[in-house]
Amino acid sequence: MYFRLLKRVLLETDKRLLFKLAWNMGLKGMLSVEKHKRRLRRGEVFPPFLYVSVINSCNLRCQGCWVDVAEKMEAMEPETFHRMVKEAQDMGNVFFGIVGGEPFMHPKLFELIEKHPDCYFQIFTNGHFITDEKAKRLRDLGNVTPLISVEGSEIVSNERRGRDGVLSKTLQGIENCLKNKVFTGVCTSVCQSNLDLVNEKWIDRLIDMGVLYTWFHVYRPMGPEPNYQLCLTPEQQLDLRKFVVEMRSKKPIIIIDAYFDGDGQALCPAATGVSHHINPWGDIEPCPIVQFSKESIKHEKDDRHLRDKFLQSAFLADFRKLAAETTRGCIVLERPDMLKALVEKHEAKDSTVRQTAIAELEAMTIRTSQYNPVAEIPESNLLYRLAKRFWFYDFGAYKGVDHTKDSAPAMLAKMKTDTAHV
């Protein structure tokens, strides 16, 4: 499997792009994590990976979307973006996840990226705007990988994403990237309607297409119109985890996950301090689904260096502490009540346009997330296990914490026990 994957990577991607990936994202990315570790030993948290929503607008209307895609377009100004990247680089950062909305709707997307050839960018996109010409530009830049979302069959995609003809346009975007030998990934927000993609045949199809990495992340019911019918059951989430671990040992394709360490223990990237999110208005948020903020990257609002905005943020620090002490999973899903209390304690602003984020938290009920302490599935692929051990784990965030009381699995178990005695 290792040889087949190496052969695919070497033969199916532009060699210059591979060098950029190995140098910018590989070596320099590992060094950024090492700097993160040293900061942690000093009690300082500046995330080595930043996710930046450069625009709120999108051409699709996905079920359960929490982004204000239908509101007036807000596209991050290049000057703001460039300053943010430069100040993050001062801290050793080189990786930036570009999200939205739909990033390719940003009128100056390529301008944002081309001024930073020493960084690496992953663009989360539906692929509809990736023409052959734009795929050529991605190849010319070399330090960009598109992660293109596929949400099921044509019928399922149309319903899931609120438009007709979604899948064919997405597949065309993927084809344009692969034809130009761009290092390309495909992701799926796994939910009840697209569970049929969690199978070996779909992985084989991605490999045959020339896709080099994939990411199965779990649908989270957030936003003004959450669709709880799409949520996976705990058993289905466990099956997904088993599938990912098995495919990593069998198939010559890279499979990403951001919610488990090498031993199969759940983690939250925001709780561990590995990543935080910046929205199109410049607000710094714990993660994309926690839409509350106290700091901004815009200098007209706060002219401190980005370093100080992170290191001195009591809201972000308390979020990480609360999240880590409450669960190894997602505190938004498992304890929205505790998150609401934290937001009110810090008087953090609602960073959405709709201004209903607090009401959305109030309306949520306790749900399970990736944390399943009785069924942890460790990595069976040695390379993934070693990589996670050194560069993606909990960084001590959960050390000495007992999650048997406040986490969703414990509370739901108690509720079942209480109900059984009624």
Image: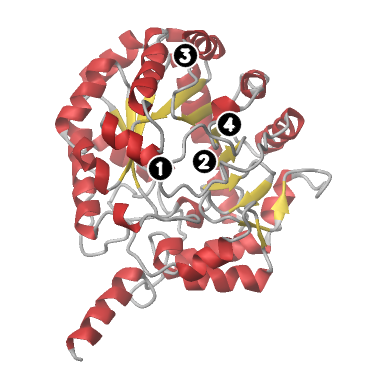
The residue shown at (81%, 49%) is: 301
Task: Looking at the image, tell me whether mark 1 or mark 4 is earlier in sequence order.
Answer: 4
In 3D space, how far apart are the residues under numbered discs 3 and 1 (Cα atoms)?
A: 25 Å
Q: Which mark is residue 94?
A: 4
Secondary structure at badge 4 equals loop
Looking at the rendered structure, the kind of residue marked 4 is: Val
The residue shown at (37%, 69%) is: 366
Looking at the rendered structure, the kind of residue marked 1 is: Phe
Q: Which residue lies furthest to the bottom in this view?
A: 422
Residue located beneath label 1 in the image: 390
Secondary structure at badge 2 equals helix
Tag nearer the camera, 3 or 1 = 3
Tag nearer the camera, 3 or 2 = 3
Q: Which mark is residue 177?
A: none
In 3D space, how far apart are the residues under numbered discs 1 and 4 (Cα atoms)?
A: 18 Å
In terms of depth relative to the viewer, which is nearer, 312 or 65? Answer: 65
Classify 10 Å Cα crowding around label 1: few (below 14), some (14-19), many (20 and above): few
Are dots 1 and 2 in contact, CB under 8 Å?
yes
Classify 10 Å Cα crowding around label 4: few (below 14), some (14-19), many (20 and above): many
In 3D space, how far apart are the residues under numbered discs 1 and 2 (Cα atoms)?
A: 9 Å
Classify 10 Å Cα crowding around label 2: few (below 14), some (14-19), many (20 and above): many
Task: Looking at the image, tell me whether mark 3 or mark 1 is earlier in sequence order.
Answer: 3
Secondary structure at badge 3 equals helix
407 is higher (above) or lower (below) than 222: below
Task: Looking at the image, tell me whether mark 1 or mark 2 is earlier in sequence order.
Answer: 2
Q: Which mark is residue 33?
A: 2
The residue shown at (22%, 36%) is: 197
Looking at the rendered structure, the kind of residue marked 2 is: Val
Q: Which mark is residue 17?
A: 3
14 is higher (above) or lower (below) than 2: above
Task: Looking at the image, tell me whether mark 3 or mark 4 is earlier in sequence order.
Answer: 3
In 3D space, how far apart are the residues under numbered discs 4 and 2 (Cα atoms)?
A: 10 Å
